[in-house]
Image (tube, coloured by chain):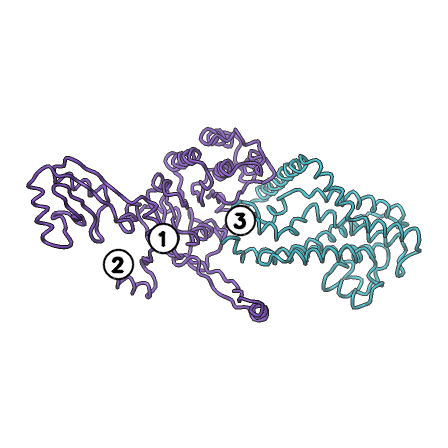
Amino acid sequence: MPLTAVIEARGLSKVFHTTVRRPGFAGALRSLVSPERVAKVAVQDVDFRVGRGELLALLGPNGAGKSTTIKMLTGILTPTSGEAVVAGVVPHRDRERNAHNIGAVFGQRTQLWWDLPARESFSILRDIYGVPEDQYRARIDEFDGLLELSEFWDTRVRHLSLGQRVRCDLAASLLHDPPVVFLDEPTIGMDVVVKEQVRRFLRHQVEERDRTVLLTTHDMTEVARLAERVVLINHGRIVLDGPLQEIRRRFGGTWQVRATLADPADVEEIERIEQRGEPALLPGTTGIGVLRREGPRVVFGPVGDDAPTVHEALKAVIARFQVTDLALEENDLEDVMRAAYLSDVPAQGATEEFAVQAASQGG
Amino acid sequence: MTTRTTMTAFLHSWRVAWRITRLNFKARLEYRGEFLLGIATGAIWQVSIIVFASVLLTRFPGLGGWSSTDVLLIASMRMLAHGLYVLFLGRVQYMNILVQEGIVDPCLIRPMPVYRQIQLNFFPVNAIGDLVVAVGLFVAALQRSSLDWTAGRIAYVVAGVIGGMLVEAALFTALAAAAFHFPATSYWSQWLEELMGTFGSYPLSILPKAVSAAFTFVVPLAFIAYFPAGVLTGHGGDMGVPEALAVASPLIGLAAFVLSRLLWNWSLGKYTGVNG
C-alpha cells in the first residue's frame, strides 16, 4: 500500500434516480399520471487509494460503474455518499482548485473546441490555466515529440480521426502539468501503432513525470503493459484490488505446465503422488497439482485457492525436477477477464447477503 | 486577497474571455457562407418588427395613447437589449443541446466558472445581424424623439437597455437551469422567444389588464423595454404599476439575473451528467 495516497475513494457511492416507463400505451399513460421512480445504484461503497507515481487500471464490464467512479473523482458528479479526496481536495466541493490538480481524458468525448484547430484549443487552455509561456512551449514540444501532434494540430478538431483527436486530448489534459491524471478509455479507436505510442507516452508520464494515473480500459494488452495494480469493479462494487497476477490467480487459474521428466526416479515419485488420490498435490509446494501423466510426460496445474501463477509454478517445477522438455499454457488475459466479469465474487465488506453467499462458497 | 490581486484576477479572466471570443469568432469566420447567413438570419428575424415600425410611423398617429415615436423607442430598446443578450449571454438558450453533447462535463473540470464557459462555447454570429438592425432602429427612434436628451436620460436609457438584456438573460437562464435535467425545455425556450418578440415591442396598456399583468409578474417582459421607455417618455404613471416599480426596471433586471444565476448554480449542483 502506498504511503501517501494521491487519489482516495472512501465508501464512495452514487445512486441515480430514474423514472421507469411501463410497457404499452396504457402503461405510458399510467406512467404519466403516477411515474414509478427507481433508484439505480451505479457505484456502491467503493474504497481504494492510489499513491503518487502509481498507475492504476480500473477494470470492469460495461456499466460496471467505472465512468461514474471517475466522474466522482474528477468532481463532475457529486457522490451520494462517501468521500473522494484527490491531491488533498474534495473534487466536487472545490472544483476550481481541483481543476488545477487534475487532467482528464474521456476517450469517447472530446474536451477540445470542436470548430478550432487543436493547437488553438491548447492556447485557450494555456490562458484558462494561466500556464507561463515558456513552460507552455516546452510542454507542447515534449508532447509533440512523443505523440507526433504537429502533423495534424492545425486541423480543426471536427476533421481529426479518433486516434488523432484523443492524442490531442491527452496533450490538452497535461498542459497545466497536473500531478493526477484520469483517463477513461484513452486508446479507444486507435490502431496498434498509435496505441503503442500512447502507452509509451503514459509510461513516460508516470515514470519520468511522477504523475498518478487512474485509467479505465477494455484493452487487456494495455493493462498488462501499463498497470502495476488493478481494481476490478462489477455491479458498482469493488471485486478485487491488487496486482494483475491476483486477478489471474482468482479468475484465470487454468494454466498448465507440461514437462517431460528426465529422471526415472522423479517419474516414480509422480506415480506415487497420483496413487494417493485427488487432489494430487506436489509435496513441498502450495497449489501445484499433477493433472495427468503419460510415461515421463507430466501435466501440472493449479489446485485450490492458493495456486501460484504459471511463472511461479514453472520455477517450482524446474527447481525440483530435471526436465528435457517444457511447455506452458495459460489462459490469455481476455479469458481471465471474461471469467472475472461473469463471476459474482463479492467485495470485502460487502452486504450481508453477499457475505453469506461468500461464506457458502468458501471464498 | 488584496484589492490588487483581485483586480489582477479580474483583468486576467476578462483577457481570457476576450481571447476565447476572438478565436471563436475566427472559427466562425472561416465558414464564410455560414457566417454571412448567420448575420442575415439575425437581421431577418427582426424584419417583422421593422415592418411593424414603418407601418406604425407612416399610417398611425400612435398606439394606445402612445405616439408612434414613443412606441418606436420601446421596439428599438427591446431589440437592442435582445441583441446584447444574444451577444453576451445567449448561449444559455442552447443549454439542452450542450448538456446532450456532453459539453458540460469538461467545463466542470476546468478552472473557470461553468456559466462563463457555456457563454464562451461559440460566437453568436446572428447577434451581429440583430445588433445592426437594432442600432439602426434605435438611431431612427432617437432622431424622431422630441425628448431632451440630458445626461440623466442618457444614463437611464443605457441602464434600461442593460436591464432589459438582464431580464431576457434571467428568463433563459432559469429555463437553462431546468435544461440540466429536462431536454424538452427547448420548446419552452422557443415559445418564450416568440412571446418576447411578439409582445415586447408594444405598449402593454393596449392589452387586457390580466394579460398585461401576466407580462409584468409572470413572464416579466414589461421590464425589458416597455417600462424603461415609458419612464423616459413620460408615461410613468399610466402603465398599470406604481411608477417607482417601472423606474426600478434596470435594478429588477439585475435582481432577476442574480436570482436566475443562483437557480442555475443550484441546478448545476444536481447535475447527473450524460451517459452516467
> Mark 2: which amino acid?
Gly
Against A193, is B41 above or below? below
Residue on which disc 2 sits: A363
> Mark 1: which amino acid?
Tyr
Residues A152 and B171: in front is: A152
Q: Give the left or right position of residue A303, taking residue B14 as reference.
A: left
> Mark 3: which amino acid?
Asp
Rendering quarter of residue A261: top left
Residue at image position (52%, 68%) is: A36
Whether label 3 touches label 1, CB < 8 Å: no
Q: Chain of mark 1?
A: A
Residues A77 and A177: in front is: A77
Residue at image position (44%, 60%) is: A41
Q: Give the left or right position of residue A91, taking residue B56 as reference.
A: left
Q: Colour of chain B?
A: cyan
Sequence order check, earlier mark of 1 and 2: 1
Query: For the residues marked 3 and 2, what is the alpha-carbon distance in whole angstroms?
Result: 40 Å
Q: Give the left or right position of residue B196, taking residue A349 as reference.
A: right
Chain letter for purple?
A
Residue on which disc 1 sits: A341
